[in-house]
Amino acid sequence: MVLCAHITQTPFIFIDALHTDADSRFSTYAARNDGWDIPGKNVDSPPLHMPFEVCPGILVPSSSPERRTGLLDHARQTKSSYPKGQIDVFLHEGLINDAIAALDPYASHTLVEQVVDAALQLQSQLDWVIQACRKQAEYIMDRGKAELYSSAANWLAKARKAYQMLEHQEEWQTYLDELLSQHGRKYKLVPMLKALR
């Protein structure tokens, strides 16, 4: 089954691997003139996104290195208020810097978390991870959103992991002590912060 969707005027092809013949799953892509051949569909632009959690593989499995580079360049230049498609592609390709660049300053916490988790897994851009996690956690704590304190603690746990990977445990402890001092009266938050020592 092939579904087409338009995200920021860029066609993205989603392939439902669960309903696709496994033997022909990747062999159906073939460059034909300027278009791409997908059974039952004639697509003017190449596929830029596949659901990687279901169908891991190369960005465009049968494309040439030049075409692949062109697709990645196009994704880098595409601006979107919700760049999930581009971020999925960049993370799948291990391009953490590009994924970070695709995030705008007001990106949703789910997109930020997706990039943070990938960066932690690859142990890449850990200083950015720390700043991103601190920003998310501090936003919650500074506004006294008690119902979201567990989310703030999760962000801080990710930051602590990045500090540890950088072997900056003392900086982490200093930061945590500052948070405990600043938010010491928030009785629901304090035990969560102490658990991060």
Image (spheres, rainbow, N blue to C red):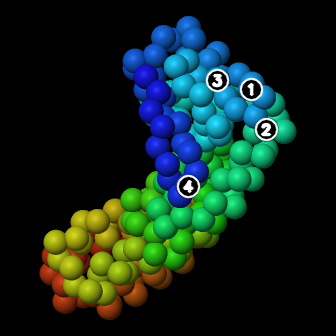
Q: Earlier in the sequence, mark 2 or mark 1?
A: 1
Above/below status of 35 relative to 106: above
Q: Earlier in the sequence, mark 3 or mark 4?
A: 4
Q: Residue at x 21, y 79 (%)?
A: 145
Relative horizontal placement of residue 147, taking residue 114 as reference (left or right): left
Relative horizontal placement of residue 147, taking residue 152 as reference (left or right): left
Q: Residue at x 32, y 91 (%)?
A: 182
The answer to whether the residue labelled 1 contacts the one labelled 4, judged by CB atoms less than 8 Å apart, is: no
Q: Which residue is mark 1?
A: 31
Q: Residue at x 67, y 29 (%)?
A: 36
The answer to whether the residue labelled 3 contacts the one labelled 1, judged by CB atoms less than 8 Å apart, is: no
Q: Earlier in the sequence, mark 1 or mark 4?
A: 4
| Quadrant containing the C terminus in the rendered view | bottom left
Q: CA distance from mark 1 to mark 4?
A: 21 Å
Q: Amino acid at mark 4?
A: Gln
Q: Which residue is mark 2?
A: 67
Q: Which residue is mark 4?
A: 9
Q: CA distance from mark 2 to mark 4?
A: 19 Å
| Quadrant containing the N terminus in the rendered view | top left
Q: Within 10 Å of the Cα at label 4, are there few (<14), some (14-19), or many (20+) other Cα atoms?
A: few
The answer to whether the residue labelled 2 contacts the one labelled 1, judged by CB atoms less than 8 Å apart, is: yes
Determine whether the residue tagged by mark 3 lies in a helix, strand or loop: strand
Spot occupied by residue 135 in the image (x, y as percentages of width and height) = 44, 78
